Amino acid sequence: MADLTAVLAQIKPKLGCVADNLALIEERIAQAVLAKADLIVFPELALTGYFLKDLVPEVARRLDSPEIVRLKELSRTISIAVGFVEETDDYRFFNSAAYLEDGEIRHLHRKVYLPTYGLFDEQRYLARGERFRAFDTKFGRMGLLICEDMWHLSSSYILAMDGAATLLCLSSSPGRGVEEAELGSATSWQSLTATTAMFLNCRVLYCNRVGYEDGVNFWGGSEYVAPSGNSVTRGSILEEDQVTATVDEGALRRERIFSPMLRDENLFVTMQELRRIERERGR
Amino acid sequence: MAGLTANTDLLRQILVGFVRDEVHKVGVRKAVLGLSGGIDSALVVFIAAEALGPENVHAVCMPYKSSNPESEAHARLVAQACGVNFTVVPITPMVDAYFDMFPEADNMRRGNKMARERMTILFDHSAQHRALVLGTSNKTELLLGYGTLYGDMASALNPIGDLYKSHVWQLSEAMGVPKEVIEKKPSADLWAGQTDEEELGFSYRQVDELLYRMVDLRLTRDELIAAGFDAAFVDDIYKKVQNSHFKRRLPVIAKVSNRTIDRDFRYSRDWGK
């Protein structure tokens, strides 16, 4: 597999303004194409903004909507991972992320873990996704995660077991915790992305938005974490950015030779014990 | 206590960004605020000047005849230090005209009236300058309800409402608020010699330590007492927070339809911004 140039579009979407956000996304895509990038990753709900509440049905788009069709078209020149609210035929609304390539939807992920605690209230407005599946791309096998999904170890584990070597995480993470040298949310996320990459010998492309919604800030800090767990490239904190990451295929191969944890992972033992736990919980 | 010590660089970046972003996104370039001569409004005007440029910030000092003259001098000093526009609008004529009709009114009624008089002036200036009104209530006073509903608690945006008084002191120092203003005793300045801490019956430091553990860390009553807080103090503060909660909410609406504002008609304020 060849090296990959990925762009993390650290944008500031406008809340509930699909047309404006699509224009912003197209602008960032054009820049990335000019820079000869192979892949561009946008944040969670890039097309809509985050604290949507009752706006969810208004900003939701079907997969055959003009906006998604337009993005599919654009994916003929560059692969695109983007977050939006998806409306289904049975009128459910999902916090979804699409991986678009060569004019097709290569993969659609519906956020499984909808946080509904603290400042979050997603489960009130959105339907829950029910699967994690890795998928093949021009740049190898990948997995998609949306923000809170990554805080569940099982999500990344399943994707890695399913063969994903690259985890794309689309995020709208609110910044909080100002006691320490780094923003509290940034510290937590950075240890999460680094640990995930290291445990699973995977690389992580994390794209987080910026801007404010009703006083809540989104902290950015989009990054490319190598399979060693080292953060190779990181975007600015709290400011818009366009982060370019050169994803080195050789680094993946070398890491998997040095630390073959993924090779040695025993899926049989894991499944056997999980089945036992499931049985025992059901009793 | 770690939680009451803030990274002031980070705090400054977030709050300056907040004012800039939230003001600009509604299509406005300016802000207006009341400058009392105290530390809270001094900090907010420093944040606003950095966020919007001092030429886009209008600070209004609104003394009453019983206000300490030092307050106006400090307000002027603060405005000069950060270079914002500064005007003085005394509220004595309107407040006195009203209380001539109700001479028996006590200090609380008079204080609330003054706070609401200032509010009407700020919102009028906001229309005059096409500016948003910035709030200057900190988290300590918001939680204790130590403010006037629809008076000093009224604003479009409040950059410091999630900062305890202890944070306000730290950030003010970091941002260069004049020393005189940081070091003087906090006061509502309704009458000569009044201080917040005397009126409240405890110091801001004490109550911040308690509120931080009670509200932010959610320690139980037993845990707070085990941590060394006096049971009566804990109960008193809990009651103050509870009894002032109405001040932190919108007016209660009687529900009769399927979509009642704020109950099942829910949108962010930044809807479409």
Image (cartoon, coloured by chain):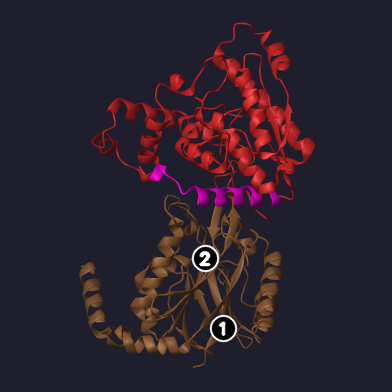
Chain colours: A brown, B red
Bounds of the magenta span?
B3-24
Determine the secondary structure under disc 1.
strand
Residue B97 image point, x, y percent:
72, 12
Which disc, if any, is residue A5? 1
Quadrant of res B147: top right
Crowding near pointer 1: few (<14 within 10 Å), some, many (20+)? some
- Identity of the residue drawn at 34% across and 90% down: A257
Q: Which residue is mark 2?
A: A221
User: Is residue A51 visible in this depiction of the protein?
Assistant: yes
- Identity of the residue drawn at 45% across and 37% down: B166
Q: Amino acid at mark 2?
A: Gly
Crowding near pointer 2: few (<14 within 10 Å), some, many (20+)? many
Residue A41 in magenta? no
- Identity of the residue drawn at 46% across and 19% down: B199
Mark nearer the N terminus (1 vs 2): 1
Per the model, the C-alpha gap separating discs 1 and 2 is 18 Å
Evaluate whether label 1 is on the same chain as label 2: yes
Q: In the rendered view, tell whether residue A245 sits above or below residue A263.
A: above
Quadrant of res A274: bottom left
Residue A174 image point, x, y percent:
50, 57
Along the horizontal axis of the image, is B34 left or right of B238?
Answer: right
Q: In the rendered view, tell whether residue B32 sits above or below residue A54.
A: above
Determine the secondary structure under disc 2.
loop
